[in-house]
Image (cartoon, grey):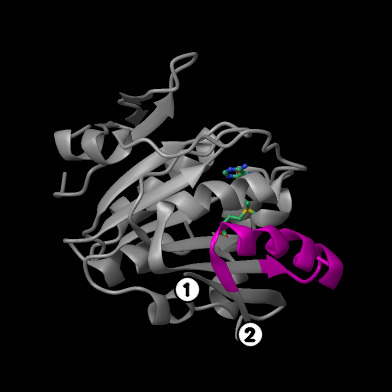
Amino acid sequence: MTNMTRSIVRRSRPTGRLRPCTLPIGKDEWAVTRKCLIAAGRRATPMIGVTTLHRTPPWVMNAFDRTLRPLLYNPERIVRPFVATGDRAADIGCGAGFFDPALSRLIGPSGELLLVDSQEEMLHRAVERVRQDPGARAEVTGVLVSDDDLQLPTGIDFVLMSWMLHEVHEPESYWRSLGHAVRPAGKALVIEPLVHVSARRWDEELAPAEQFGFVRRDTGGVLFSRVAVMTKR
Ligand SMILES: C[S@@+](CC[C@H](N)C(=O)[O-])C[C@H]1O[C@@H](n2cnc3c(N)ncnc32)[C@H](O)[C@@H]1O
């Protein structure tokens, strides 16, 4: 084991408190450290009414991530402008963790990386992917969320939402929660696939962000994708 925290936390019902659990992955047990418990236990505003429209199955992301995707995209180049050493970063809808070794390397050992997904298998793959990267040394916490409930600690410097917002049924609830979690001047990088998300749908996804304190700036630079940087006022 390295100094990385490897754990999955999940919400216990009906209390809503985050409850850590160790999950066997191959021959490993993921250790739950005190620091992780504290990080994961900070309450944020629960999201109500978020459901997924459809969910990409793990095997699809895995196949894409291991074949075509690395040829088309450099995850480090995409996120580098937005993160710094020591940041608290969250990859929401992290999938199989395509961006996460790069994020972990960039924020370094003093940084904290939250991997958030509603599919446990995705989360396992993402945490494992970071674990296997020799240069990735940030503290990592996997957070399993239910479709209608996103809980994040506050004080987040950077949020990545790559190709996931179109799977969220109620973007408004999502942005409300992010409005509490992201610190002033913190950023959310939203990337959506052109093939799934029309210009109208893109506007609908991002429109609620403004009322929860985000300023939108559309950018580019990611193939076949719509991209916006949302800065918290
Ligand atoms: C198309 S995959 C993209 C994965 C990853 N962001 C990437 O770019 O490789 C979408 C991911 O979002 C997750 N997801 C969908 N709805 C979610 C929700 N409400 N909360 C958290 N994760 C969600 C899915 O389980 C899936 O792993």
Q: Name the amino acid, label 1.
A: Pro
Report whether 95 appears left or right of 103.
right
29 vs 46, nearest the viewer: 46
Rounded to the nearest angstrom, the CA distance separating label 2 from label 1 is 14 Å
Quarter holding the N terminus?
A: top left
**Location of residue 165 with respect to 36 vertically, above or below:** below
Q: In which quarter of the image is residue 223?
A: bottom right
Quick check: is 196 in the magenta stretch? Answer: yes
User: Residue 143 or 119: which is nearer the viewer?
Assistant: 143
The structure residue drawn at horizontal position 70% and vertical position 43%, both measured from the top left corner, is: 55
Stretch of the chain drawn in magenta: 192-215
Please name the residue that numbered disc 1 is placed on: 75
Residue 114 in picture, x, y percent from top left: 37, 50
Residue 42 at least partly seen:
yes
Q: Which mark is residue 220?
A: 2
Nearer the N terminus, badge 2 or badge 1?
1
Q: Residue at x 46, y 64 (%)?
A: 99
Q: Residues within 10 Å of mark 2 (few under 14, many from 20)?
A: few
**Badge 2 amino acid:** Gly
Q: Let me know if residue 189 is in the magenta part.
A: no
**Residue 220: % across, % down:** 63, 85
